[in-house]
């Protein structure tokens, strides 16, 4: 999907994209006219090329739930005026590579290649960070489950964790998910009762 003004460069870009096996969907936008980015883009099949000389929106639609500097699909910026404000606006929309205007067909593939791979790299990092955050949130269940196994089976900390890890592998889930299920399935476990008893004794 291409957001730019009409011109000779647009024809070169469309022809080059077709030769690369892509299907250009051009959305001509007058230079000083505001426009909205679409809400139906997917990372697996779409790629957006945005002209930095346009009146760019400040962010993608809220429906994508994307953070700043990240886009819902690979995004390439068209650079005409190399003003810092223009470049910053494209970066804020997640443009990961750039094509200089006037466009030369030989530069298109490199820009697309860098844009797609940069998007996948950032997307992979985001998934890893989300996974780490979820694992950190669930560590309390691992601690509780390890303590319960130590108390019930007379194991040391390493042996108790190893037992839970092997059980999670058999269940084909992460050890955090396994321990969460174990603890939530037994909210009135002996471990909790032990804590309650100690609190009562302290009083």
Image (cartoon, rainbow, N blue to C red):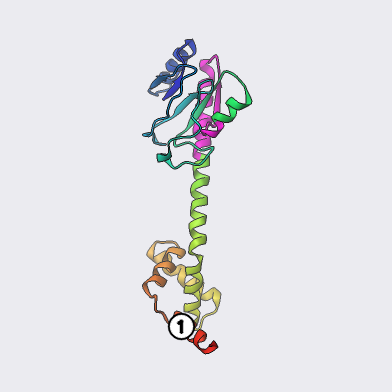
Q: Quadrant of the N terminus?
A: top left
Which range is magenta? 91-120
Picture coordinates of residue 98 (x, y %)? 55, 25
Picture coordinates of residue 166 (x, y %)? 45, 68
Which image quarter: residue 11? top left
In this rendering, is residue 195 above or below 158? below
Q: Say whether residue 110 is magenta.
A: yes
Which image quarter: residue 48? top left
In this rendering, is residue 80 above or below 138? above
Residue closer to the observer: 175 or 7: 7
Q: Say whether residue 25 is magenta.
A: no
Q: Residue at x 53, y 23 (%)?
A: 52
Residue closer to the observer: 147 or 158: 147
Picture coordinates of residue 77 (x, y %)? 52, 25
Q: Residue at x 42, y 69 (%)?
A: 167
- Residue position marked by numbered label 1 in the rendering: 152
Counting the numbered discs, the total is 1
Which residue, as the protein is rendered here, is positioned at the far bottom?
201
* Label 1 element class: helix
Q: Residue at x 49, y 52 (%)?
A: 130
Circle 1 Cα neighbour tier, 10 Å, few/some/many (<14 / 14–19 / ≥20): few
Picture coordinates of residue 137 (x, y %)? 50, 61
Q: Residue at x 44, y 83 (%)?
A: 193
Q: Main secondary structure of the magenta part?
A: helix
């Amino acid at each position: 999907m291409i957001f730019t003004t009409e011109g000779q460069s647009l024809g070169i870009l469309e022809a080059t994209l077709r030769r690369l096996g892509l299907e250009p969907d051009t959305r001509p936008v007058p230079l000083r006219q505001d426009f909205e980015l679409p809400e139906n883009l997917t990372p697996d099949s779409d790629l957006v090329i945005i002209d930095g000389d346009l009146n760019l929106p400040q962010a993608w639609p809220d429906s994508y739930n994307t953070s700043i500097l990240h886009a819902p699909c690979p995004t390439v910026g068209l650079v005409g005026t190399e003003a810092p404000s223009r470049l910053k606006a494209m970066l804020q929309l997640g443009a990961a590579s750039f094509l200089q205007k006037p466009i030369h067909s030989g530069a298109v593939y490199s820009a697309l290649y860098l844009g797609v791979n940069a998007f996948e790299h950032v997307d992979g990092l985001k998934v890893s960070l989300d996974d780490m955050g979820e694992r950190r949130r669930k560590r309390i269940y691992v601690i509780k489950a390890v303590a319960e196994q130590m108390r019930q089976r007379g194991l040391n900390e390493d042996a108790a964790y190893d037992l839970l890890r092997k059980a999670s592998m058999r269940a084909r889930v992460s050890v955090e998910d396994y321990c969460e299920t174990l603890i939530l399935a037994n909210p009135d476990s002996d471990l909790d009762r032990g804590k309650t008893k100690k609190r009562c004794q302290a009083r």
